Structures are given as C-alpha cells and as structure tokens.
C-alpha cells in the first residue's frame, strides 16, 4: 500500500438482531455497529463498537427482550406487542 494513503474509513450498519429468545424482524430495529478502518502508511487497524444510544442495548441485554419502541414486533411476540399502540408499524404488512 502506498505511504501517502492515510485516513479513516467509517461505516455503520445494523449487526445484532437477536436478544435472548427474540429475533428482530425489521432492518432498523437491529442494534447498530460502527466499524472503523484506520490506514496509516503501511498499517491497517480495525475497531468496532455497538452503539448503545440511551442505553437501549444494555437494557435489552439485561432484560433478555427488546426494550422501548420497535418498528415491527419481534419473533416470538412480546406481551407488550399484543397491546395496541405500543409498538409502531410504519413499514411492512
């Protein structure tokens, strides 16, 4: 790799769709992960981190089920998904 190539490449994408026995069904409900590739001359370094915005990830992992608002109900459905008006369905059937 040429020495003049230096910098960071950062991307974000959903990466985790399973919480306990639940599987998140919608792309935007997955927990997002930031990936960074740092190029510095002849070296390449990689780092990655799950985004824990408002401690949504931590609370979900502790409870063993998805917390707060989801776009679609997970599989299997939670008790909260059976109550009208709690889970928003913007996309899908």
Image (cartoon, helix red, strand yellow):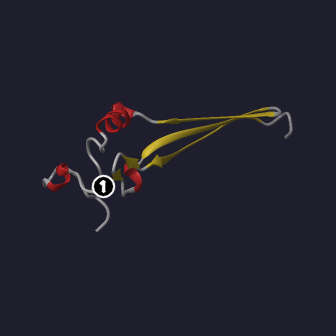
- Left or right of 3 on screen, residue 47: left
Q: Which of the image's four quarters has the N terminus?
A: top right
- Left or right of 66 on screen, residue 18: right
- Mark 1, residue position: 74
In the image shown, does 43 or 59 lie closer to the viewer? 59
Bin the neighbour count of mark 1 within 10 Å (Cα to Cα): few under 14, some 14-19, many 20 and up. Answer: many
Residue in view at x 45 percent, y 36 percent: 51
Residue in view at x 37 percent, y 37 percent: 57
Q: Secondary structure at mark 1?
A: loop
- Left or right of 93 on screen, residue 53: right
Residue 3's place in the image compared with 80, above or below, is above
Q: Which of the image's four quarters has the C terminus?
A: bottom left
Q: Quadrant of residue 72?
A: bottom left
Residue 38 placement (x, y as % from top left): 69, 34
Residue in view at x 36 percent, y 53 percent: 24
- Left or right of 24 on screen, residue 32: right
């Amino acid at each position: 790799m040429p020495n003049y190539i230096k910098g960071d490449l950062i991307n974000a994408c959903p990466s985790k769709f399973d919480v306990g026995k639940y599987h998140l069904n919608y792309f935007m409900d997955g927990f997002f992960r930031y990936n960074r590739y740092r190029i510095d001359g002849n070296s390449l370094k990689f780092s990655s981190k799950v985004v824990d915005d408002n401690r949504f990830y931590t609370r979900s992992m502790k409870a063993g089920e998805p917390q707060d608002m989801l776009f679609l109900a997970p599989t299997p459905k939670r008790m909260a998904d059976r109550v009208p008006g709690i889970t928003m369905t913007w996309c899908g059937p």
